[in-house]
Amino acid sequence: MTKFGDLISAQKPVLIDFYSDLEGTKETTKSLRSVSAVFGEKAKIIKIDVVKNELLADALEVKENPTFMIYKEGQMKWRHSGSLETNDLIDLVQQYL
């Protein structure tokens, strides 16, 4: 498994969706696919299951699902808990290109 530090150390923006299969994720998954299609290789889009990665979720104080974070060069640039529209996610990632 890839280490979290390796995932977030990229020069390009990394949008992470912390989610739980226990809660509805269908719309979020569809939204993330759209974001990924817009940016291609210019950004990383990652989903992390908080149940399977409980220690990481606790360390990052993820309390609500979904929780989105954007990292770039190992630094958290943005964070939001709760659903967001696809266009809002696209606009946010665009800011960090």
Image (cartoon, rainbow, N blue to C red):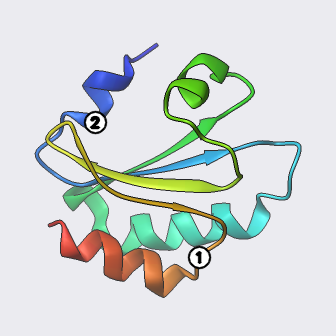
Residue under circle 1? 84
The amino acid on which the numbered mark 1 sits, given as a three-letter code, is Leu
Mark 1 is surrounded, within 10 Å at the Cα level, by few (under 14), some (14 to 19) or many (20 or more) other residues, namely some
Image-based side of 33 in relation to 52, left or right: left
- Farthest top residue? 1
Total residue callouts: 2
Q: Is residue 81 shown above or below 27?
A: above
Q: Quadrant of residue 90?
A: bottom left
Mark 2 or mark 1, earlier in chain: 2
Label for residue 8?
A: 2
The amino acid on which the numbered mark 2 sits, given as a three-letter code, is Ile
The residue under the point 39% across, 18% down is 2
In the rendered image, residue 69, in percent from the top left (x then y), is placed at 43, 53
Element at label 1: loop
In the rendered image, residue 14, in percent from the top left (x then y), is placed at 31, 50
In the rendered image, residue 19, in percent from the top left (x then y), is placed at 68, 46
In the rendered image, residue 44, in percent from the top left (x then y), is placed at 33, 50
Badge 2 vs badge 1, beta-carbon distance below 8 Å: no
The residue under the point 60% across, 41% down is 62
Label for residue 32?
A: none
The residue under the point 20% across, 60% down is 42
Image-based side of 58 in relation to 5, left or right: right
Which one is nearer the viewer's eye here, 51 or 37?
51
- Farthest bottom residue? 87
Q: CA distance from mark 2 to mark 1?
A: 21 Å
Q: Quadrant of residue 26?
A: bottom right
Tell me the quadrant of the picture where the C terminus can be found. Answer: bottom left
Image-based side of 73 in relation to 83, left or right: left
Element at label 2: helix
